[in-house]
Amino acid sequence: MMRTVASGLGLVALGVAMVLGLLAAFGAFGGKAPQKGPSVEASESTAETTNQQAEQAAAVGQTVTAGDVSWTVTDTGQETELRTYTFPPKDVFGSYVTMDFTVENVSEEPVTLTGDTVTLFDGSGIEYQPEPDRNSTFVEPEKNILFNERSLLEPGDTREGRVNFEVLPGASGFRVLLGGTDPTVSEGEYVDLGF
């Protein structure tokens, strides 16, 4: 008799543990996990700061220097779909900003570019980072220099690159912050994309 009661209590405890585990896994306890994607909130101070930065921004075709690299945005555009460069071709629909650029290592040390060295802002101050999944299969490897082994630039090296940003539909007033490669220094120059 005692053995049956203990077995029953063990099964009840196991069931309770499973239910609590499921609830925890689906976020019933604690705060909501952060969602991936562009933030749709911009504070008033952020909007004022971005307006000041837009007034000081360089134009497409002008060269800017940020720390150990110099950048020239050579072409930009808005797209409603991205197409893979691999076979079989695949289209991904959405709202995108594309940017072609040239970058040069102007330091005396090797540098490595990453997706964090380029940040896009819209006219509302919303920040967009380039995502590897919108670049790696949609930009040819020789131009996908933010997300592959070609991101290492020796002193004096110059490379052409391309980057895609997924943006909110209807967003406009874009400018890009082109930064240096030293993560301990917040430096960068803005370029107004003209749309």
Image: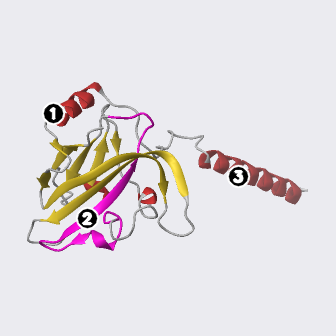
| Residue under the image location 70 percent in, 47 percent down | 19
Q: Quadrant of residue 55?
A: top left
Q: Nearer the viewer, residue 184 or 159?
A: 159
Q: Which residues are magenta?
A: 144-172
Is 72 placed left or right of 131 in the picture? Answer: left
Q: Is residue 85 above or below residue 61?
A: below
Q: Is residue 87 visible?
A: yes
* Label 1 Cα crowd, 10 Å radius (few <14 / some 14-19 / many 20+): few
Rendering coords of residue 183 (x, y %): 21, 57
* Label 2 Cα crowd, 10 Å radius (few <14 / some 14-19 / many 20+): some
- Give the Cα distance between marks 3 and 1: 57 Å
Q: Are marks 2 and 3 in contact (CB under 8 Å)?
A: no
User: Does label 3 or label 1 sit earlier along the sequence?
Assistant: 3
Residue on which disc 1 sits: 55
User: Does label 2 or label 3 sit earlier along the sequence?
Assistant: 3
Rendering coords of residue 43 (x, y %): 31, 28
